[in-house]
Image: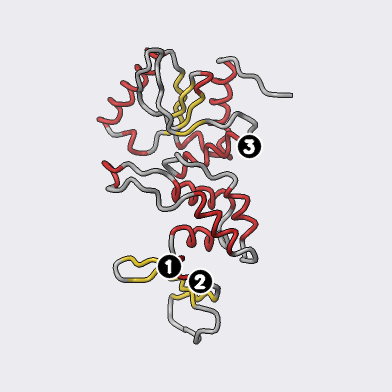
Amino acid sequence: MYHVIRPEGAAHLDRPHVIVHRMKLYDDEITVLDGIPITTPERTWLDLAEMLTVDELVVAGDSCVRVPRRELEGRDTPWCSLGDLQRMIDRHKGKRGIRKAREALKLIRVGSDSPQESLLRLAVVRAGLPEPELNVPIVDDAGTRHHEPDMSYRKYRIGIEYEGEHHGDEAQVVRDIARSERYAALGWTEVRISKRHMHNDAKAAVAKIRAALVQAGWRPGP
């Protein structure tokens, strides 16, 4: 199914497998890919607010603003910035889904590398735990930079690693073991989360993280 935006007042378009939307579209909200005009990432994100949940919109927004790794993706510039998303909201105040977009924007963060990492962060914060930092390198007492946990609490020396399907690969298992050894050598606690911890609103994942925080000295506020 294809979604097409037609300017207000344009002639009717009736094509199979095509959903037509009539709305205001500014020139700087259009880009070209392989010769085909499409909406920019930030405008597409705003349009998705009509059909996605807030959490799904946060996942999409996290993906838009994350800083890619050139060696893996061939680019090092985000698709757009938080400011670009805010500009879309400010420009289209009466658009359907705008309230969800505003709510989602408050929860979008730079640094989340996967949908599951985004959903885990949201579950952690909603459970009343401190918000973790994303992909911040561990720096030891000598000032040496080490690897970047998916999420971390530097104050409590806790690193959280979300392990997707590729972590079952034999070479990745070897790397994961080496990573766990580095955590131990640095005096950090590693919390490993997988898909099975994400069921039932990630309650099992939150419980593991909470236990590590409490053991490290964190206490919930009043």
Give whichever of discs 1 and 3 has the lower sequence position. Answer: 1
* Separation of marks 1 and 3 at Cα, in angstroms: 36 Å
Q: Which residue is mark 2?
A: 25
The answer to which image quadrant residue 162 occupies is top left
Name the residue: 49% across, 50% down: 61
In this view, the residue in front, 220 or 74, is 74
User: Residue at horizontal 59%, vertical 51%?
Assistant: 54
* Residues marked 2 and 1 touching at CB (< 8 Å): yes
* Amino acid type indicated by mark 2: Leu
User: Is residue 37 placed above or below 186 in the rendered structure?
Assistant: below
Cα–Cα gap, marks 2 and 1: 8 Å
Estimate the x, y position of residue 170 in percent, counting from the top left: 26, 30
Q: Is residue 159 left or right of residue 165?
A: right
Q: Amino acid at mark 1?
A: Ile
107 up-or-down from 159: above or below: below
Earlier sequence position, callout 2 versus callout 1 = 2
